[in-house]
Amino acid sequence: MKELINGTHATQVQRENKMFDDGRQRYLNRLKGNSKLSTQNNPHKLITEALPRVSTELQDYLTTQENKGDGRKHCGYKDLKAIDTDVAAYIGLAVCYEAVATNGCRTNILNMIGKKVELQQWFDGLKEFDNQLAKSIETKVTKDEAVEFFKVKAAKAMASKKDYVKEDWGPKDITMKVNGQDKDLCERHIKVGALILSAVLKASGVFEGWDKREGPKYSDFRKMIGLTESARDQIADMDYLVSWQEPMFRPLVVPPKPWTKFDTGCYFTERACKQVPLVRKASYVQKKAIEYQLKDGKELPDYVQALNALQETPLEINQYTLEAVKWAWETDAPIPKFPSKTKIVKPKRPDDFSSMSVEDKKLITTVEKEIETKNREIDGAVSLMTQDMADADEMSLYTKFFIGWNKDFRCRVYPVSNFSYHRDDPIKSLFLLHDKTIVSSDDSVYWLSMHIANVWDINKLSKKSLDTRVAFVQRRERLVYAIGRDFIGTFKIWSKADKPFQFLAACHEYANYMDCRVVGEDYMCGLPCSLDGTNSGVQHYAAASLNEDDGALVNLMPSDKPQDVYAAVAKVTNARLKQIADPSFEEPYLKEIKDKSGKVIKTVQQVRASRIIFAKQWLAYGVDRSTVKRNTMTYGYSSDAWGFGDQLIEDIMKKLSDKVIKKELDGTTGKPFVHPFGEDTWSHSQAARFLATINYSSVKQVISSAAGGMSFFQKIAGALAHEGKHLRFDNPIGFPMCQRYTHWDVKKVKIFLFDREAGINKRTQATFRSKSPKSKVDKKKSKSSIAPNVIHSMDSSHLLKTVLDAKKQGVTNFFLIHDSFGTTPAESEVMYESVRHTFADMYSDYCLYSEFWRQSKKQLSDEGIKKLDDLEIPPKGNLNLEQVIESEYCFS
């Protein structure tokens, strides 16, 4: 048993310093893995900042040459003119930096720049010849892990097969010394390279020429290119600062420093505080507004007091689930959603692969790519789990520890450290509340049993009545006890739970309670029991509009059993799928599909036939509440049909593909699993996009309050954006939510086969801002983001208000995740009442839409207000908010 210790302030300061040491080492390791020096963050920043200056210099040179008319021009003029000056500038800058880092001489630099320019001209010609062919070749060769020489060779070979051939620039007709040896070089390469290098040296401010002496004679020197003194200092400073500005934030072993200023809370050392502001990525306006609210002499705003209360909650590691997680990880236990550390073996290509059809080759290569992607994910999972287990072991040494908290610009609260309970089930299960409370009364046992039922969720137990859930668990006490005492022997049972490791943790606590009950002792329990909201986005829209229908669907009104909005959407979707699958049904509004040139790709009859196939596939697969859940949850946050499709691809199609590539067996037939939506990813995406449109219409049909609310917010945000203004909204807890989306004028410089080897994150282009962003509001982003930002701001207001109210009622333990409210079993009854009263109180005598419009008018011009004369507050229903207090299931 590890010896437990109490944290001290001195220990915490040491830990904070180590956070920066660990972060610096992580940064340096990342640099080592970056094989292309010019794409490391700091050099790349210098290069992209210098690019406009060098490009302008090249443009001026070309203008000077053109003004000569028929006069004699530089022999490299035509080649330079043939490519974009931004591309030429980037080639010159990046080649120079690679040469600086590898000690390359000037002649080599000139030759390399010329070669890159020739290659770029070849590719530009290919695009003019056949743009689709160019894209295809680029995709293939850039994904190849071969060195650049072989990539170029492969690209030219593929192009020649399609009859695109371009003569090389000419013979190697000059001999020059390179690294002390005579080398035959192409004069055109040298000439155009000289023009570009001259512009780099003249305008970049980053590079300069110097002579490297290599012998006793005056002539024994090499012409080199180096960094200017200011560039060297800048890179050194940036490397130093960045390496120390990436701390690996971890939990604290003493109570976090209370927030009283914008950047003096959470941690204790000054440099850690500077890295953890009260609000992440706050705009200048938002920061100033918050700093004004935090002026000396003023009472701390409610949202700060609530955040400090969250930070004060002590935690400890659950040793039982820590052992279980380690055992499952070491044995690679088959648990749904639990990460695996076993890589998938890529199958050997068939011997006759080269003679196969294009379609068969595509299927094989697609599987190979999916396996490679999955193995990369496994690498990431191994790294993350290793760090998590190390953090858990370290925190196990302390009797208690704490998590620091801060906010995003919407007011949502987040743990600062990555190791926290805002994580998936295995990591979340590792946390217990340190200040335990007695489990003895009927109430505390009731809430402990309720939590077990919710995380077990066998046969959708969480959708039953509260009493049914509790009775189900208490009738199975002996099974719960067995699971709580032997996680290996009962693996086949607990691993099938909805949240396996949280279920295991809950069973362990219940087993402890049962042992104490036998001997007549009170049991002190620190298990966090959570009360989860029913689709909080719709709850807020329904409350804002007093919409009874939507309120009933998300349990804001009393009922005998929980209402299930996801099941309601699934029901409408299934009815629609059955309609479409019927060949006799005539779908209105179907249109033929055309390409850009107007050529018909699919007739109406073919479109209809495809939809019948998709509908039958989905009906065979089975569309239930889980299929539509994420789509329904995100609808109120402005997710559209396209976003729905992305979610279905991620949540369903990729998981089915994983089963195929892992060669898992079908549970029904015992044969290898076959993807129900076809073999290729195109079929998968099309099936997902099809269901997404059906789900979108179903959600709109079932939920009525959200559409009007989203439209209302978007019209106002659009009006402000039209005036070049960003939006501010002070939410019910007084937090200034400042939405700021700036549209930058950016220039993207893409260079063929160059600058692609940037480690894992391959950089395919250089991007730089070409103009000042003053008063340029991104209108599209402002409109699309306003609804989710406001609703997130409201649910955070509710959470923080609940913290303050529950604290007044005596609750000291908080285990909160956005719309999930957790505390110990003995404090759960108070939390259960507080979360309801706070929600009802927040919307009583408060119209979200009227208040939002009132605040927005202060920011709009008179003309802007006049343009919204026809704007109407979304219609109100007759939802009685007092009924929220009586509803058992709105937070359960």
Image: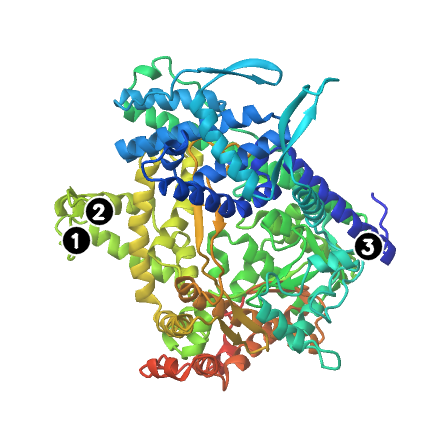
Residues at marks 2 and 1 touching, judged by CB atoms closer than 8 Å: yes
Q: Which element carries disc 1, helix, strand or loop?
A: loop
Residue at x 63% of width, y 31% of height? 101
What residue does disc 1 label? 590
How far across and down, in percent of the image, does residue 239 sit? 68, 43
Left of 436 or right of it: where is 473?
Answer: left
Residue at image x 49%, y 49%? Answer: 768
Viewer-closest of 112 and 631: 112
- In percent of width and height, residue 387 lies at 68, 42
Q: Crowding at label 2, few (<14), some or many (≥20) Cα neighbours within 10 Å?
A: many
Distance from the alpha carbon under mark 1 to that under mark 3:
65 Å
Residue reaching furthest to the bottom: 845
Give the residue type that dot 1 points to.
Leu
The residue at the point 28 percent across, 20 percent down is 161
Q: Indicate the quadrant containing the N terminus: top left, top right, bottom left or bottom right.
A: top right
Residue hosting label 3: 12
Q: Nearer the viewer, mark 2 or mark 3?
A: 3
Q: Residues within 10 Å of mark 3 (few under 14, many from 20)?
A: many
Indicate the quadrant containing the C terminus: top left, top right, bottom left or bottom right.
bottom right
Task: Between label 2 and label 1, give the one nearer the viewer.
Answer: 1
